[in-house]
Image: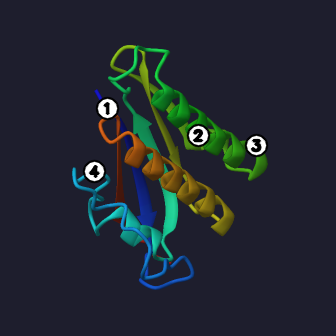
Amino acid sequence: MKIRAHFVCRGAEQGGRGSRSEGSKDRSEGSNGRNEGSGTGSIEKMLSTDAVWCGFTVSGHDAAGNAGFSVLCAAVSSAVQLTCNTLTECFGVPEDAVQVTPANGSQNQISLRLSSPEPAQSGIVRGLAVHLMLLAEEYPKGLAVTVSQEESPSQ
């Protein structure tokens, strides 16, 4: 089994304040095809836009480690918990924005959904995406990261 992390963005416009330089590494096109985004394109493309990062879902387990002893699972779990706690305890996101659903025995699915994220809140979710993407480079068989873009709500 693999850990799967999926992020949701909206309202991306190319070349915004988060643009990366031309020389930046495209993390979405590794030799094994990991970290491919769904919908509008790669995670790297979404990171180089003014996308609003609205939430994520993380589930699964790193099959390389025994339950409770995987360095990758510990790293992902810690990062997800830090993100959820920072948003709820420090940035006023309602606790019900975080959902923990038991899935497949002892493995949980953790989701966080921001209905109207402020820039700082979106940045924290984006930071988790960057962190997990870098972990996926180190552990390509244990972690898959995807991203999709949704339509912005009508104003």
Q: Residue 51 appears at what percent x and percent y?
A: 48, 71
**First of labels 4, 2 by sequence position:** 4
Q: Which of the colour schemes (rainbow, by chain, secondary structure, one colour) is used?
A: rainbow
Mark 4 residue type: Arg
Residue at the disc numbered 1: 2
Placement of 1 over or under 120, stated as above or below: above
Q: Name the residue under label 2.
A: 79
Quote the CA–CA distance across marks 3 and 1. Answer: 30 Å
Regarding residue 15, the answer to whether it shows in the image is yes
Question: Where is 98 relative to 119, above or below?
Answer: above
Q: Where is residue 13 in the image (x, y as percent from the top left)?
A: 43, 82
Q: What residue type is labelled 3?
A: Glu
For mark 2, give the secondary structure. Answer: helix
Q: Do the residues labelled 3 and 1 touch (CB within 8 Å)?
A: no
Residues at circles 3 and 2 in contact by the CB criterion of under 8 Å: no
Let me know if residue 115 appears in the view: no
Residue type highlighted by circle 1: Lys
The reply to whether the C-beta atoms of the residues labelled 4 and 2 are less than 8 Å apart is no
Give the Cα separation between the discs numbered 4 and 2.
20 Å
Q: Using the rendered view, name the quadrant where residue 57 is placed.
A: top left
State the residue at coordinates (49%, 77%).
20
* 63 and 151: which is toward the camera: 63
Q: Point out the tag, 3 or 2, that comes first from the N-terminus.
A: 2
What type is the residue that disc 2 sits on? Answer: Ala
The residue tagged 3 is 89
Q: Name the secondary structure under disc 1.
A: loop
- Please give the residue where the numbered disc 4 appears in the rendered image: 34
Q: How crowded is mark 1: few (under 14 residues within 10 Å), some or many (20 or more)?
A: some
Quadrant of residue 148 within the rendered picture: bottom left
